[in-house]
Image (cartoon, grey):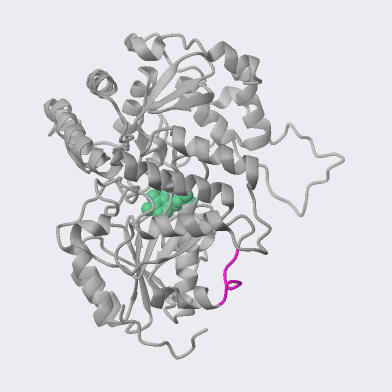
Amino acid sequence: MSLPSPSTPSTPPAPTPPGEPTGHIDGGAPPEWTAGPDRTDSPSRTAEPDRTDAPSRTAEPDRTDAPSPAPQPGRADPAASDDRAQGAPPDRTDIVDLYLRHIGSGRAVMGRVMGGMAEVRSEGAWIHADDGRRFLDFGGYGVFILGHRHPAVVEAVHRQIDTHPLASRVFLEPVAARAAQALAAHTPPGVDFVHFVNSGAEATEAALKLARAHGRTSVITTRRGFHGKTLGALSVTANPTYQTPFQPLLPDVTQVAYDDPADLEQALAARRDRACVVVEPVQGEGGVRIPRPGYLRQVRALCRVYGALLVVDEIQTGMGRLGTWWGVDAEEVVPDVLLAGKGLSGGVVPIAAMAATAEAYAPFSRDPYLHTSTFGASPIACAAALAAVRAMEEENTVARAAALGLRVLAAVREVCAPYEGGLVREVRGRGLLIGIEFAEEQAVGELLLEMIARGVLVNHSLNSTRVLRLTPPAVVEDAALDLFLTTLAEALRSTAERMSG
Ligand SMILES: Cc1ncc(COP(=O)(O)O)c(C=O)c1O
């Protein structure tokens, strides 16, 4: 790294349901906030949305006009009754009601839009709902590269629970040390230090603070970039929908065009030795935007020239998602700071990490109290991370993701081909991060619901409303892939008909 010493050291909006306006789903106007609720006379029900307001298609997904579901999803799940016996909700309406009363009307409405199911169980590429159906998970927001409940990760977590799930934070924590070592064995050369946190957004926060500790107070982010939604992370998540309600955010944040080294250079030249650049190797939430080859290398070189700290956010692209351990590996780029999350836990316990070179990490290394969190680097989460990394090594997950990604991308392109130039604008992807860009954003919501009705889960993209995102696990088997492709073909046909009619 070439960080001259500073003078003063020291991450769906819901998919737009058919017929819904774009932007946030709002299940009802929130009650006006006053100085504080009077608990004695606050009418608890006044804040509740009028449930009859919910968009009509949302109240009950119209199953009657959807083609008959594929056999697997529609098939009764024999373990479903066990789920109920074990305390799973017996009545889906109750869950919607509880959401309305205690979690939020918007989320309740969204749940109804998605069909009203509650998810109660998962394994491999499958999620089971309380109504006995199962869903093939090609979404999961990029978390489940190992699938759900990988046995080795689950076993390691059980073991940790039975011994020492959370630490005193007085003594050293062996599982955190081993997890850091295991992760550092795969990070780019020299990116050896690891600070574990509980979420992707927290990893971004840690990076922004580390940059400040180096005097890099001017932050450069890319348009459509997504880095989390806590206040600091939101400052670099370039989406006015999420930023505007919370202004003012962090000062001195500049957005430059993604995949545009010249724009970046201009911003850097005006901030010599003061800047921190935050960038994704492929923009995931931005709609699977893949930069031209060489972009990351140019970003790396420019950061050197202008004395900027380079933070590469691999929270979505890392852990094999792109068919390499990290997106930077494809260009042999060594960032000063690398952010990991999502798949890092093996999809079992929330954990994320900020990894850095010794030089970049120095302020955190010197002072362990500079940035702390009670639950950060908890033994239970670190046990999950350690087991996940080991499982990926043993099962060759990264290579599997690369090979499967090529097959899925080619097959999705084939299925979408009849619609290109019309409903579908482009299919693009790298590894197991694949985007289908539609001509109109309404198509994303339509297709998503059509897929759910047929038993397959996919995601929208938070910063690119016309892009449907596929992030399947690397453990998908041929039969499941065939089911996905058949379902996609049917859902596309139905969406095209609906939108043209
Ligand atoms: C690239 C990237 N960075 C940061 C985040 C935020 O992570 P989290 O949702 O765990 O806070 C996300 C989440 O989607 C992401 O894709």
| Quadrant of the image containing the C terminus | top left
- Residue 446 at what x, y percent from top left? 34, 26
Q: Is residue 68 above or below residue 452?
A: above
Taking the image as shown, residue 394 lies to the left or right of residue 422, namely: right
- Residue 251 at what x, y percent from top left? 47, 72
Q: Is residue 313 magenta?
A: no
Magenta-tinted stretch = 367-372
| Quadrant of the image containing the N terminus | bottom left
Taking the image as shown, residue 193 lies to the left or right of residue 383, namely: left
Q: Quadrant of residue 124?
A: top left
Q: Is residue 369 magenta?
A: yes
Which residue is rendered at x = 64% and y = 19% of the image?
86
Residue situated in front as seen by the camera: 465 or 343: 343
Residue situated in front as seen by the camera: 360 or 280: 360
Q: Is residue 459 above or below residue 363?
A: above
- Residue 259 at what x, y percent from top left? 21, 61
